[in-house]
Amino acid sequence: MKSIETELTKLLGIRYPIIGAPMFLVSYEALTIAVSDAGGLGMFPLPNYRTIEDLETALKNIRNATDKPIGVNIHLSGKFPWKDQLALCLEYGVNFFITSLGDPSLIIEDVHKSGGLVFADVISLKHGLRAKERGVDGLVAVAAGAGGHGGKIPTIVLVPYLKENTGLPIIAAGGVSTGYQLAASLCLGACGAITGTRLLATHEADISDDYKQAVIDTEPEGITCTDRLTGNRAYWIASSIEGIEASPELGSRKWKDLWSAGQSVAQANEIISAGEVIQKMAEGCLCTLESTLRNVKGNIL
Ligand SMILES: Cc1cc2nc3c(=O)[nH]c(=O)nc-3n(C[C@H](O)[C@H](O)[C@H](O)COP(=O)(O)O)c2cc1C
């Protein structure tokens, strides 16, 4: 079986430089296991589990199914029991952490002691430089059009911008869901990519069939960006949030009816397994790199 080796795959011990995005109310055990077993890195966000006991059950389920590396998205704010979450994750061998809220330096020493890595989600160079000062191992470049809380700068600009100005390893996030998009990310200097939106339309995503169908049916033109629901810019399937305003009544049941997705709905045309998504991305990436090189060489000669 082929593999794609980058700085990220070497650091994490995975076959392909593809990370299954941690997605709120979407990625639980099944998706995490499927992505890791397919040679990528499966991830889930810790807020998906309301109690430490639920988190431990999830980690046990994952560990009973696979011994492959996995990662989590950790929120380092007072609202979350992140110290207990961190201790549990390290106990179960989680070796990759993406921080979104809070100061990543709070966890770096402990994670490094266990041989793991800490990357920070950033949408700008200012964020990237601050995370670098705090000692992160790399950055996730959250670009415009990414599902969830996407940024303002397109992937094609943000990845080299962050890489050139921070010198850190960069993971591309935003619109990377096929082999040619993964190849493009590597050409931009990324050491890997996170794919989120494409994994919504998979058997293992823990969301309603209506949500999956909407991801397939929606075109990029049907994706809207607004801060009115969470207070931060986020990308949504426009039809699912029509007429909805933020309010204290937006409990977790209601959140499940507000469908976040990024512009790469363009490449989500059928519901398949997450393993197939990863496999197709990897194979497509190698084909794209080989054929591009062949074509360019031909033209130069
Ligand atoms: C429904 C949804 C929920 C998300 N929730 C989170 C989250 O809880 N934590 C996080 O770090 N990123 C979250 N993201 C962002 C993804 O981790 C990832 O950066 C993004 O989906 C990549 O861009 P793409 O959607 O274009 O593939 C979410 C994305 C989606 C689509």
Image: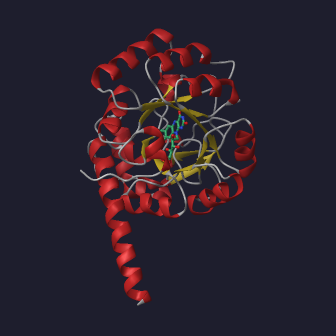
Q: Quadrant of residue 202?
A: top left
Vertical order, 127 against 80 (above or below): below
Judged left or right of residue 17, residue 280 is left
Vertical order, 297 against 272 (above or below): below
Which residue, as the protein is rendered here, is positioned at the far bottom? 301
Q: Residue at x 52, y 45 (%)?
A: 236
- Judging from the image, the colouring scheme is secondary structure
Judged left or right of residue 292, residue 155 is right
Q: Quadrant of residue 201?
A: top left
Q: Nearer the viewer, residue 251 or 105?
A: 105
Judged left or right of residue 148, residue 264 is left
Asked whether residue 76 appears in the rendered view, the answer is no
Q: Nearer the viewer, residue 175 or 139?
A: 139
Q: From the image, which quarter does the C terminus lie in?
A: bottom left
Q: Residue at x 75, y 41 (%)?
A: 130
Q: Residue at x 41, y 58 (%)?
A: 266
In this figure, what is the number of numbered marks?
Answer: 0
Vertical order, 298 against 70 (above or below): below
Q: Residue at x 66, y 18 (%)?
A: 79
How far across and down, in percent of the image, does residue 16 sit?
A: 37, 48
Asked whether residue 276 appears in the rendered view, the answer is yes
Which residue, as the protein is rendered here, is positioned at the far top? 53
How far across and down, in percent of the image, does residue 243 sit?
A: 57, 40
How far across and down, in percent of the image, does residue 40 sit?
A: 37, 42
Q: Quadrant of residue 31?
A: top left
Vertical order, 236 against 293 (above or below): above
How far across and down, in percent of the image, does residue 286 sit?
A: 34, 62
